[in-house]
Each structure stands twice: as C-alpha cells, then as structure tokens.
Image: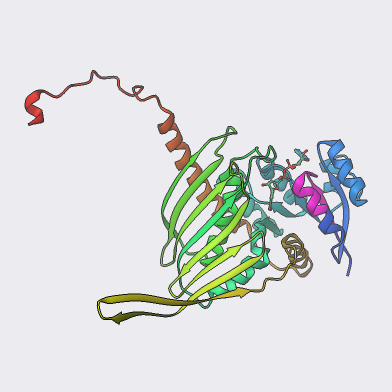
Amino acid sequence: MRHVQIGVLGAGMMGERHTRVLRGLPGVHLVGVSDLDRVRGRIVSDRYHVPFVESFEELLGRVDAMVVATPTPLHYEQVRRCLLAGVHVFVEKAITQYVEQGEELEDLARRLGMLLQVGHIERFNPVCIELKKILREHTPVALSFRRLSSFVSSNLAVDVVLDLMIHDVDLAFDFCHGLPITGLHAVGRIVRSREIDHAMAHLAFVGGPMSSFVASRVTEHKVRAIEITATDAFIEADLMHKEIRIHRNISSQYQVSGDNVKYQQRSIIEQVQVPATEPLYLQMLDFVQNLREGRPPTVSAADGVRALRVVREIINQVMANERERSRPPMANVSAPVAFPTVSEHV
Ligand SMILES: NC(=O)c1ccc[n+]([C@@H]2O[C@H](COP(=O)([O-])OP(=O)(O)OC[C@H]3O[C@@H](n4cnc5c(N)ncnc54)[C@H](O)[C@@H]3O)[C@@H](O)[C@H]2O)c1
C-alpha cells in the first residue's frame, strides 16, 4: 500500500512533537514542515531531517493529509482551506476558537467526505484508557480534574480554559459516554496575562456524575490529576507519573467494649500498572490507520465542538464574574442613596 503523504503546518512546540512522531510512523511519508517563522521552521526541519516547505499553499498541493499545529485562532481558516483542497486534516485542540467555526468545519468535512480528527490527546493517554476500563466496573458519583502549571509565555494566544481545561472537559464527556450536562457554574481570575489564567468549573452529567475542573497556568507546581469517587471505590490517577490507585473498603465496623466505642475501617489500595507508551504516538498511529482504512475519526469534529461549547460557556461565566468583580464599588450607584429612618430599624 502506498505511504500516506503528510505535512505539518506550524513548527512550534506541538508541531515539533508531531514532526518527531510522524517521521518514525509506519506507512507515513512526512513530506515537509511549514511555518510562517522560517527560522523556527528550519530549526525543526534540520533537527528531524524533514524538508522545510516555504508556503502553506505549496505544502497543501503535495499532501494527502495535513497536521494543523498552529495557534488555535488560525485553525478555522487553515483547516477550511485544507478540506476545500481535498486534504484530510488532523487539527490540534481546540478545533477552533469559536463554536460556530467548529460547526462549520464539521459540516464541511461531512459534505466533502473528508477525515477531520481533533487532537484531544488525553483520549490516547494510557492512564485515561485504563481509567475508562476501570469505570466499566464502577458507578462514578463525582469526577474531579486538576490541570495546573506554572506561568510560561508560550500559548498565551488563548486563555487557560481553552488551552488546558478543554482536555478535561472532553475526557469527562468521554468517561460519561456523551451524557448531556446541566448546572454549569464557573469562576476564574486573570492573574498574569490578559486572559483567564486560573479557572474552576462545576457541572453535572444528567443521569451521571457531578464533575469539577480546575485549570491554572499560574500555579508553581505542575499537576495533572483525576480523582473519581465511585459508589464502592475511590480512584486516583496521576497523568504525569502514569499512576492509578484504587482504594476499596473491605470492612468497617464499630467495636463496643464497655463505654468505649471504636470505629474501625479496613481498606485495600490497588496499584494499577499503566503502559508507558507515548500518547502522541498512539494518537497519530490511530489517525493514520483511520486514514488508510477509511474509518471515521476517533475524536470527531462533533466531539471537538461539544467540548468547545462547554468551554465557551465557562469562559463567558468567568468573564462576566470578572467584570462584576472589577467594577468599582460605587460605579453602579447613580440614584441618591436612601438612608433608612430610625423607625425603619425597629
Ligand atoms: N495536544 C496537546 O497536548 C497540546 C499541547 C499544546 C498545544 N496544543 C495546541 O497546539 C496548537 C499549537 O500550540 P503550540 O503550543 O505548539 O504553539 P506555538 O506557539 O509553540 O507554535 C505555533 C507555531 O505556529 C506558527 N505559525 C503561526 N502562524 C502561522 C501561519 N499562518 N502559518 C504557519 N505557521 C504559523 C508559529 O510561528 C509557531 O511556530 C494550539 O492549537 C494548541 O492549543 C496542543
């Protein structure tokens, strides 16, 4: 079978990782990498011995599929151009900046019969794959996701909700098999950039667990944690260290001796072995197999739009709260203040 001809658009942090992985993937010929920043593009091209292609148009004309790894605000236009040129697309998350743009791309790909897969990479994280298997045996009551990082100047084109929290929102939908949601509530803060840097959100899945999300890029400790309270177990996962622990209660009893009442609980902790395979490798292998075998995307445009819709609502709530919080205390007092009379106090 002929090798799939693939190009990488955007040679930044993610584009470089895609270049490294695609170069070694069976059945793939990496045609080239392109970046508006030629210096950056050539560094990646030299480092991985892959041709640097000057322009997007030139690369477009030479490939079957494109990996779009540019800043999210550019995804809509670039993915649209790929699809219209008959080029299949793997687009990094978030699918687009705005919901309507994602919906349009979803519709376009469907009408043109093109593969459009979204880079919600945590679906391919062996820890999350294992968690999904564990969840088949447990009924989750609550899911908690924490994704905390310190401040770095990369990826400030979007806020932390669109950048980081979206990973966990997509995972939550995946864990809950796409159940609808209700009762979304979110707060957040702009701390060091011009966008939301720290956010918290709560929502509930109808007929499923309640969920909480914390995402930060101003926390001086990197955390990638998922905690699941199930009816008969507590499951904790560390995505960075690839660890899962399941706490199960095996007995609990009161012991009464005279006036003395003691409560004793015995638990076991099961440590789950997680394979060390790189999620990006699994994700790109899956994309290429979908392409070669004409299969639908594993993470579809509809999945990307579903996560984006929730994330947009979280951003709207946070920004509304922030505007309210930063309003000067007296700014909205236009009418004279009526002081209560003494009798009104009685
Ligand atoms: N899946 C993940 O875990 C993950 C992690 C980080 C980032 N991302 C996503 O990957 C995308 C890129 O993020 P990043 O951190 O690599 O950003 P980055 O800023 O490191 O890289 C973006 C690159 O795109 C280039 N670029 C800008 N405009 C361009 C244009 N018009 N044509 C060609 N190249 C252009 C820039 O020069 C830069 O080299 C974003 O959508 C981000 O959300 C995904």
Q: Is residue 297 visible?
A: no
Residue 234 in the image, given as x and y percentages of width and height: 49, 70
Give the position of the N terminus as an image quadrant: bottom right
The magenta region covers 6-19
**Viewer-closest of 107 and 272:** 272
- Relative side of 273 to 322, left or right: right
Identify the residue at horizontal 52%, vertical 63% (top origin).
227
**Viewer-closest of 69 and 291:** 69
Figure check: 2 above or below 51? below
Figure check: 26 above or below 90? below
Identify the residue at horizontal 62%, vertical 54% (top origin).
106
Identify the residue at horizontal 70%, vertical 42% (top origin).
71
Q: Residue furthest top?
A: 336
Q: Is residue 276 visible?
A: yes
Does the magenta run of residues contain 259? Answer: no
Figure check: 139 above or below 324? below
**Viewer-closest of 45 and 293:** 45
- Relative side of 288 to 341, left or right: right
Quarter location, residue 146: bottom right
Residue 295 in the image, given as x and y percentages of width and height: 71, 68
Q: Ligand 1 sits in which quadrant?
A: top right
- Relative side of 50 to 83, left or right: right
Give the position of the C terminus as an image quadrant: top left
Does the magenta run of residues contain 12? Answer: yes
Residue 64 in the image, given as x and y percentages of width and height: 82, 56
Identify the residue at horizontal 74%, vertical 59% (top origin).
280
